[in-house]
Amino acid sequence: MTTKHVAFFDTTLRDGEQSPGCSMTTQEKLTMAHALEDLGVDIIEAGFAMASEGDFAAIATITQAVRRPKIASLARAKQEDIEMAARAVQFADRPRIHVFLASSDLHLEYKLKISRQEALDRTAESVRLARSLVDDVEFSPEDATRSDRDFLVEMVRVAVEAGATTINMPDTVGYTTPAEYGKMFRDVRERIPAVDAQGVILSSHCHDDLGLAAANSLAAIEAGARQVECTINGIGERAGNAALEEIAAALYVRADYYNVETGIKLDQLYPTSQVLGNIITFKPSPNKAIVGANAFAHESGIHQHGMLANPLCYEIMTPSLVGVPKTNLVLGKHSGRAALRHRLEELGFSLDRDELQHTYYRFVALADRKKNVYDQDLIGILPDEIRAR
Ligand code: KIV
Ligand code: ZN
């Protein structure tokens, strides 16, 4: 069986930046764009050209400094947006315009106040206009997962006929479930044979309102999506977008199951996460998969003992695989003698059995009082004669 390529479309600089505490200057976006290029993403959505002069400038700057990935600008299905997006990406080696228009009745009625027919007409006109300006056009029926399925299929058909090269079906409000999202991709492929016949790429775009964004993205890939939209550290509107590092690591660790290849350099995941964390106003939470401070930390005695015997006992990937410097055996009240001995040896103290037992009691008493036991605390509880050795 041939291994299929899944393209990573990073929207940290557009959907990610659109969330509280995440706005970036042009220089900061450029720094991130270089990090994303080094990470190996296929497409960078650099911004929404019509949103502001700053966004336009950032996109244009990135197109001239970052050459390997495709560079995209978002545009509403409006002539002025599409023309502005085209100007912003005009110097990219491989420019893309990403046009979106809502497909759910809720959005058509309350937000856009247009009929379904008007939405179909605008889809055709705007995709055609975008295709007259660039060769690579992505179309997204916004709120796809809450749209009437027949109408969604109709809108996708119109976009494909008008020349869209990628169809992205967003779970705009993080509402869908893996089985349901996968079925949507299968339905569209079955009901619009031109999608596969013409090599139109299907793409997932998931939000994390129910904590299902990565699972839903993986379900879409199983159902034939060949592009996945995501952000570093999962930043994005509300609860965020699907986290790039989670999807990339899952596709690698479970390659036996997914059987797809990507261009992501896994050992750049943690460094890229750090670059972003130092630019925006917050870091990933400690328990964030792959890149959180605790993702490779172990405190309980049973786990630490297993880790020292064989890391595979409690780690499904090595920290170095994703660029994390090392496993962290944290000493706390749940730790056992094995981890204490290991840490003391790292600090240069070799204790015999009785000394270790004695030190262990003092350590547990300290750990009961303190949330974190640091190296200096450990050295402090050692008897003078051991410290002097
Ligand atoms: O979540 C969403 O629907 C979007 C679109 C603009 C693709 O971000
Ligand atoms: Zn989104």
Image (cartoon, helix red, strand yellow):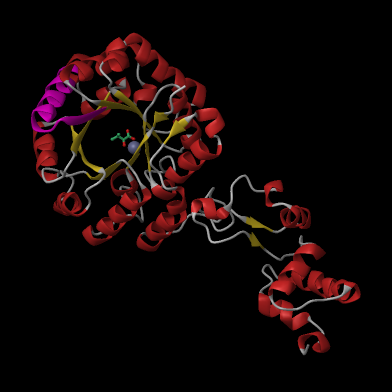
Q: Does any portion of residue 239 appear in the rendered image?
A: no
User: Is residue 303 found left or right of 241 in the rendered image?
Assistant: right
User: Is residue 139 found left or right of 179 in the rendered image?
Assistant: left
| Residue extending farthest right | 354
**In magenta segment, residue 132:** yes
Q: Tell me the quadrant of ligand 1.
A: top left
User: Is residue 150 found left or right of 96 in the rendered image?
Assistant: right
Q: Residue at x 36, y 56 (%)?
A: 21
* On screen, residue 124 above or below 291: above
Check the picture and name the quadrant holding the C terminus: bottom right
User: Is residue 253 found left or right of 240 in the rendered image?
Assistant: right
What is the chief secondary structure element of the magenta stretch? helix
Tell me which corner region of the image, top left, top right, bottom left or bottom right, holds residue 87: top left
Pinpoint residue 266: horizontal percent, then vertical percent. 46, 48
* On screen, residue 337 above or below 206: below
**In magenta segment, residue 308:** no
Extent of the magenta region = 120-139
Q: Residue at x 41, y 18 (%)?
A: 184
Pinpoint residue 253: horizontal percent, then vertical percent. 55, 39
Q: Which one is nearer the viewer's eye here, 158 or 38? A: 38
* On screen, residue 153 above or below 257: above
Pinpoint residue 321: horizontal percent, then vertical percent. 52, 51
